[in-house]
Amino acid sequence: MQPAKWIRFIAQFAQLNRRQRQAGMALLRGNTPHDATVALLEGVAQPRLACPSCHSPHLHRHGHAHGLQRYRCVPCGRTFNALTGTPLARLRHKSLWLDYADCLLASDSVRQAALQLGVHRNTTFRWRHRFLSLAKTDRPHGLHGIAEADELYVLESEKGSRQMTRPARRRGGHAQRRGISNEHVCILVARDRTGQTLDFVTGRGALTKAQLHRCLLPVIDQDVLLVTDGHAAYRAFAREAGLSHQAVNLRAGIRVQGAAHVQNVNAYHSRLREWLRPFHGVATRYLPNYLGWRWILDARRIRSPETLLKATLGAFPHLTVT
């Protein structure tokens, strides 16, 4: 390479992100991004390797395919690899998966990720929901102490549906009726003072007592202090469940009553709304995936693409959630 070309070439190094620099160093060592991804996938699968059909651990190696080691189950004769039965099964372009995990952690849109990786936008859309299907389940097991609960409403969306039940709305659109109606989907968010957060898509329309029993009762301690706004459904739920409850009268302008307030959960609502805005309306059927994605970013338990790729296969960080 001529010296002038070399100078122009190395001048571009400053524009590389961390993932691209690591891939470049791996190439200089004789490795490829594909090798690094495959090694990570095999490492996650190895400790719990078993036949996905009969769950027998009695197996032996059975050649390679698409860069992955294949195995054959001795009792039932089925063959499989480290990705069989996982959300990443049958997906291609393994060498780009860590780069795509970087895109998820950066909240890139489908088109932004496709442009950055050089693949079709349908591919990055498919990857988004495959990557999040298990990662979104890394949640707290319960809420303790003082728990705040409040609901958030977003427009019901049939984005991407082949058979819509109403005329399409442009880029999210607006409700035809004022106030809360069946045009809205309710998202219930409960958060304790340690930052542990749980959210539930309860369905269309206003929140009901039955939905609170179904969603909240299994995940909060019996001795928890539940702090909410003045919604009647919370009072009825707390009374029937035998929970300590304190309501903050937001309509009267009272936001804090001693230790009782819903500032934490409302701040989470604000961050969630702002984060959802660039997506121009999220399809209701995919809403749980986006809520899980937001929790991944807000909780900061997953900070690297390697950790996210492991979580995609169900191997979550060692730090246990309550």
Image (spheres, rainbow, N blue to C red):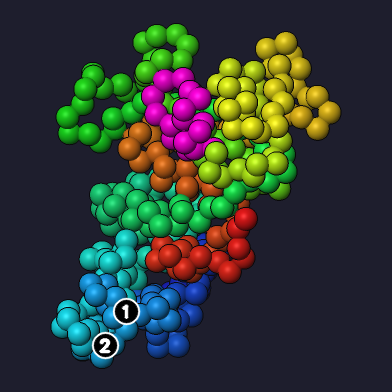
Circle 1/circle 2 CB separation < 8 Å: yes
Picture quadrant of residue 184: top left
- The percent position of residue 10, horizontal first and vertical second, equals 50, 73
Q: Position of residue 45 (x, y in %)?
A: 38, 77
Vertical order, 16 against 195 (above or below): below
Q: Quadrant of residue 150?
A: top right
Above or below 319: residue 25: below
Residues at marks 1 and 2, CA–CA distance in whole angstroms: 8 Å
Residue 251 visible here: yes
Residue drawn at 69 percent across, 40 percent down: 224
Q: Which mark is residue 50?
A: 1
Per the rendered image, the range of residues in magenta is 200-216
Q: Where does residue 303 sit, x and y in percent of width and height?
A: 57, 61
Residue 253 screen position, x and y as percent: 74, 14
Q: Residue at x 55, y 66 (%)?
A: 317
In the image, residue 179 sits, relative to residue 90, either above or below, namely above
Give, as a three-letter code, the residue at label 1: Ala
Residue at image position (40%, 57%) is 134
Q: Is residue 63 magenta?
A: no
Which numbered circle lies on residue 59? Answer: 2
Above or below — where is 93 with respect to 235? below
Mark 2 is on which residue type?
A: Leu
